[in-house]
Amino acid sequence: MMSLFNLNPLTIKKINRFKSIRRGYYSFIIFTLLVLLSCFAEVLVNSRALLVSYEGNLYFPSYGSIIPGRTLGLGYDYETNYRDLQKKLKDSGSGFVIMPIIPYNPYENDLNDSSFPPFPPSFEDSHYLGTDTIGRDVAARLVYGFRTAIFFSLILLVVSYLIGVSIGAAMGYYGGLFDLLFQRIIEIWSNIPFLYVIMIISSIMIPNFFMLIVIVLLFGWIQMTWYMRTVTYKEKAREYVMAAKALGASNSRIIFNHILPNTVSIIITFIPFSIANGIIALTSLDYLGFGLPPPTPSWGELLSQGSNNLESLWIVSSVIVAMTLILVMVTFMGEAIREAFDPKKHTTYE
Amino acid sequence: MTLLKVEDLKMHFPVYGGVLYRQVATVFAVDGVSFSVEAGKTMGLVGESGCGKSTIGRALLRLYEPTSGRVSFEDKDITHLKGRKLRDLRSDMQMIFQDPFESLNPRHTIGDILQEPYIIHHQGKPAERRQEVLKLLDRVGMPADSIHKYPHEFSGGQRQRIGIARAIALKPKLIICDEPVSALDVSIQSQILNLLIELQQEMGMAYMFIAHDLSVIKHVSDQIAVMYLGRIVEIADSETLYANPQHPYTRALISSIPEPDPRKRKNFTALKGEVPSPMNPPSHCHFVDRCPYSQPLCSEKTPLLTVKGTNENHRVACHFALN
């Protein structure tokens, strides 16, 4: 297994080539940053303050249990409304509150007395992208929706590749009856209409995050299996595998030590496109209403709200812009990786 | 002492096709071959592409399962060995491959590649293995720092040296050399051949040397078998074979060796026609369509490998040999 992670000079060459494809490399950096930042969304987008200084005491409410209003000199026992606290402390001068960049969480309804939501973007209220039809901040929902979508995609990717790579490699390596059997199973399985299955399942129960992954996984492992089967067939016929057999290497040694390291570049090439597919799958399921249950923040749900309220253009345009940006970045990454790992450029045969 | 004995070895590959994926034809890659290899000697196997010589090599090592026949190694039947016994056999029998660009895993360092035999056969501790690898590299004339390099950093000749080092790592008794020099430049070929000869003198192993080129095989072999379309047509000591070829195919092969001295150049007898498909070989004598001396008898009775002259080690499969 070591050789999977050892950096071969060829791999270094590929990585350098990837870096030289600017738009792909920058997309990769920005995208990775966005994913990392979304892990800390609670300190960037939240109704809880980053830091409260009240009567000489410091509070960090971002993580942990709620701080009741009474602790901070407000007359109630439920969670402190930090935006109000900020105004109050500013007036009284007995402390200060530092709020995150977007001082709303994705679930709260920010209503006011004079009109009905959706409210257009307003810097005064810190609703930078406006609110949706029930007064929730669009920017906050975009950020948390991104986090849900990207982790959905990544988990889906890892699990579907694990399944696809192992079944595909086994099909390609052992061939024969096992291969034939799985080919037919996959052909039959991939003819089951995915959307009907989703509709039937979500009419019986409301799917949660992990159930949704399992459902998408039921159909998502097939693609990688096909590719792995083909490349394993190809690698298996090469002479270095024959040489390993002649030495007496076991099947598992040949698969893990010889064939898999030689297929890694093909697997890597597909990763960005699988991420994009995962995001699209979750968004479209949410859009159709078969995805995550409300009020989970999701892009699909925002998109469907936006398209039903086209007069509030800020909703739909925010999601579309965000989605386009992410998918374009992922595609740039994918292109650059494919270009950098192109076997015709770095042939291992020479 | 006879190290390896092959009796009536057959290797047929089924060809599948059609909607129902039925067997529609058979490739008769090796069709009844018998010979033996003496310990410490070199058996040359020569024939043109597609005649089944590499298939024999692979069937002997049990990389392919022989269709029928019997292979015995040191008087033990190895035709149907399995599991542990098969693995043990492999430390006694190794292979050098034709294409040094393909036979080394591009993702492994030379150190990984040369340690693998010891790892598979559970020999030595990591530090000892490293020492062994350094010795091997030295033995085949490669610098010690190659251990951290990857195959693509070397030339064809160097890679073939690494392939040889891997084959001798377990000190086998027999090495099957599957056209070990045919992918190399002529100037490198002789270096590699000399290395193989030196190693044989030092370690006393037997070679089965497969080649398509009689001039290469002449250099190394004690005994030579000429193959045509899955069968051995002539087998003899190497001097006898060159001095007195009896099968018309052998004669054609020998006459095609380029002669550097223009005064000695003979008339080159080119064979007419193409090699028939091994899926559909001529019945009985396989050479009948291309033989300048063919007679009706050749299509009626299969010629067997028999002694025709005075030398009992010289056998030929032709009804009209010596004529």
Image: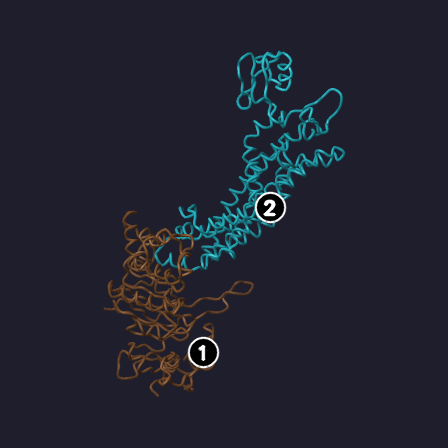
Chain colours: A cyan, B brown
**Position of A142 compared to A180: left or right?**
right
Say what amino acid the circle numbered 1 marks: Pro
Residue at image point 61% right, 23% down: A47
Residue B220 locus on image (x, y percent) = 30, 71
Marks 2 & 1 on one chain: no
Query: Is the residue B114 above or below the residue A326 in the image?
Result: below
Q: Indicate the chain on which mark 2 is placed.
A: A
Q: What residue does disc 2 label?
A: A331
Q: Residue at x 50, y 46 (%)?
A: A163
B78 on left or right of A104: left
Pair 2/1: label in front: 2
Give the class, few, some or many, for how many residues have Cα within 10 Å of label 2's Cα (few <14, many ≥20): some
**Of the pair A57 and B84, the residue shown nearer to us:** A57
Q: Quadrant of the C terminus of chain A?
A: bottom left
Residue B139 picture quarter: bottom left
Q: Nearer the viewer, residue A158 or B97?
A: B97
Check the residue under mark 1 and report the chain it is in: B
Q: Within 10 angstroms of label 1, few (less than 14), some, or many (20 or more) residues?
A: some
- Residue ID for mark 1: B282
Question: Which three-letter amino acid code belongs to the residue tagged 2?
Answer: Thr
Place of residue A269 in the rendered image (x, y in percent of width and height, measured from the top left): 53, 49
Q: Is residue A134 above or below residue B160?
A: above
